[in-house]
Image: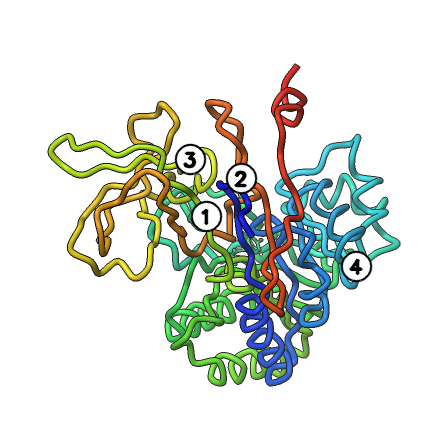
Amino acid sequence: MSLTTPYYLIDKSKLLANMEKVARLRDLSGAKALLALKCFATWSVFDLMRDYMDGTTSSSLNEVRLGHERFGKETHAYSVAYADYEIDEVISHADKIIFNSVSQLDRFGDKASGIVRGLRLNPGISSSTFDLADPARPFSRLGEWDVKQVEPVMDRISGFMIHNNCENGDFDLFDRMLGTIEEKFAPLLKKAEWVSLGGGIHFTGETYPLEKFAERLKRFSGEYGVQVYLEPGEASITKSTTLEVTVLDTLNNGKDLAIVDSSIEAHMLDLLIYRENAKLLPNTGPHRTMVCGKSCLAGDIFGEFNFEAPLKVGDRISIQDAAGYTMVKKNWFNGVKMPAIAIRELDGSIRTVREFTYADYEESLS
Ligand SMILES: *Cc1c(COP(=O)(O)O)cnc(C)c1O
């Protein structure tokens, strides 16, 4: 099988391992799990994920439609702000709609009276250390925070969404923050029928105390009499996918450099935004080399890694952990060839599900 690089390779057996943890958490805690499409929306593997999750959540009309049409089951709609021209279609695809503000609820709540309605709350605390991704940053527009403003609208809503975790692998921190949420919002939680605690909780990680987490969710659910939802994005698909690339050129400018047929700017943009290196395994050999993208952006660099042998033209490299916030963010910068999407089936065979051509590039512009 010699598929041309670059391509994202989703390994179903690894995805399945995550799904089994999600299913176990649902069993132990009674919480429901919705895939956050903004992180991962590669619908070719929804057939596998559907059996282990309760549905999807979304951040736009396009996502809620994709969730409804390609995943099915429960479909939550949320958006920072809906426009007049899209609200009817959003409602037609959703069984629950979560408004970001009381004013959006005032504007569109009546139209949505046929489905379950909720509101996003902002507890003013988060696990994020990067302000770009901190929902509780100063002056945050993400949700209502004043109990007095929300109490008068309780007759129109039956639940809340609170998303304030971000790549949080620390159960004790989750537990403490949930305690603060309970203190702040107890009067509202007592009147709610359901609460979504959002995404950003790294509960599929190898060392995460899944049982303690499940027990905490169950206790929260019992205390307020609410159905708990989680919205795992990254946790659903972590470590399931690689970006497969090939070395196109090598040079030494004081350091050994290798240029590959991909671009961190175009194909793994989140790493660049959050100033993180890509991950390569095993990363233990004696030949340290900087792996660079092929766009003309000077800082288009995947990172420096340790290889067993000096890299040469034609060598293949697998960039690890390439599922979340990659395929949903890929772009045509520099016109770099768009990675195909391939799936390693449970029997080990590899199937290409999407290739991108010049026509796709041309049609992305006019
Ligand atoms: C981003 C986001 C998620 C998913 O976050 P992950 O970190 O990928 O788990 C879930 N819910 C909401 C409201 C979000 O904004």
How crowded is the residue under tag 1: few (<14 C-alpha within 10 Å), some, or many (20+)? many
Q: Nearer the viewer, residue 190 or 162?
A: 162
Answer with mark 4 or mark 2, whichever residue precedes in sequence.
Answer: 4
The answer to whether residue 348 is seen in the rendering is yes
Q: Are marks 1 and 2 in contact (CB under 8 Å)?
A: yes
How crowded is the residue under tag 2: few (<14 C-alpha within 10 Å), some, or many (20+)? many
The answer to whether residue 192 is seen in the rendering is no
Q: Are marks 1 and 4 in contact (CB under 8 Å)?
A: no
Amino acid type, label 2: Pro
Question: Which residue is disc 2 drawn over?
Answer: 339
**In front: mark 4 or mark 2?**
2
Q: Secondary structure at mark 1?
A: strand
Ligand 1: give its quadrant.
bottom right
Q: Nearer the viewer, residue 89 or 1?
A: 1
Question: Which residue is disc 1 drawn over?
Answer: 244
Amino acid type, label 4: Gly
Question: Which residue is disc 4 drawn over?
Answer: 72
Question: Which residue is disc 3 drawn over?
Answer: 261
Task: Give the colour scheme of this rendering.
Answer: rainbow
Answer with mark 3 or mark 4, whichever residue precedes in sequence.
Answer: 4
How crowded is the residue under tag 3: few (<14 C-alpha within 10 Å), some, or many (20+)? many
Amino acid type, label 1: Glu
In the depicted structure, whether residue 255 falls above or below residue 321: above
Task: Give residue 334's position: percent from left, percent from top.
Answer: 46, 22
Q: Secondary structure at mark 3?
A: loop
